[in-house]
Image (cartoon, rainbow, N blue to C red):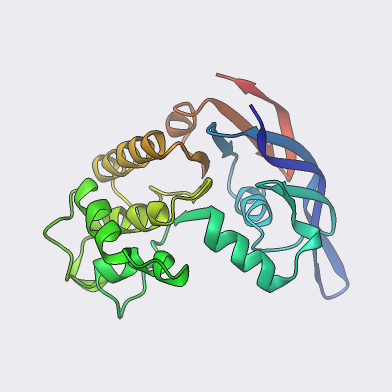
Amino acid sequence: MTKILNVRNLEKSYTSGSRKLTVLHDISFDIERQETFSIVGPSGSGKTTLLGLCAGLDRPNSGSIELCGTELSTLTEDQRAVLRNQKVGFVFQDFQLLPTLTALENVAVPLELQGAKNAATVAKELLEKVGLGDRFDHYPSQLSGGEQQRVAVARAFSNRPEILFADEPTGNLDAETGETVIKLLFELNREAGTTLVIVTHDLELANMTQRVLRLKGGKILEPDAQN
């Protein structure tokens, strides 16, 4: 299998006044296409920072990231945005739905940005798959947290991404609702043949993936290993 993500010697630090805070130290790993992979660690271990770097949302201080066959450091901000729109899906802890758009419109947005003519049709099919066929015209404020996250999961798959990054996807949900969302996430992922990368502090969720990378204090605690 070919690798969809290749991370080498990644370092990330921030400067606060005269103080330098290093968030990630010499991180190296890779992920195969269609693999399910999780990044775990306590709060402040650098999980979300690492995910943002891997997805091209931020730049490292040093090191390299190759995503979907492209070295991210060679791209401009606009080029990285195009790469994300065409090949990457996201699910965030706080849903990040557009409040002025209906559920259907939120799911259709990535497709419309690509100029797809069938955006509404695909969006309807995905919302039906996540059990929201009767919520097309509802706005985020009219949906429960679990329903909003299901809309977000449908949106993440709308542009048929090669890789999907999920950052604490059940963090704002109760246990039962979270289980429903995760089940849908894995089902849609399997159906689409997408690579799934989950950042979580939930070890039970992490153990559902094929491999786990453990972080602590911005360092890999141990080599990522098969469960």
What is the x, y in percent for residue 190?
40, 33
User: Of residues 163 and 26, which is closer to you in this image?
Assistant: 163
Quadrant (top left, top right, bottom left, bottom right) of the C terminus: top right
Q: Residue at x 58, y 38 (%)?
A: 40
Can residue 18 be seen by looking at this rendering? yes
Q: Which quadrant of the structure image shows residue 124?
A: bottom left
What is the x, y in percent for residue 205?
43, 33
User: Of residues 132 and 227, which is closer to you in this image?
Assistant: 132
Q: Residue at x 58, y 48 (%)?
A: 43
What is the x, y in percent for residue 174?
28, 47
Q: Which quadrant of the structure image shows residue 134?
A: bottom left
Q: Residue at x 15, y 56 (%)?
A: 133
Q: Is residue 70 left or right of residue 144?
A: right
Residue at the left extreme of this rendering: 134
In the displayed structure, would residue 147 be above or below residue 105? above
In the displayed structure, would residue 72 be above or below residue 175? below
Q: Residue at x 49, y 50 (%)?
A: 161
Residue at the bottom extreme of this rendering: 100
Q: Is residue 77 left or right of residue 167?
A: right
User: Of residues 66 and 91, which is closer to you in this image?
Assistant: 66
Q: Is residue 56 left or right of residue 116?
A: right
Can residue 96 be seen by looking at this rendering? no
What is the x, y in percent for residue 180?
26, 40
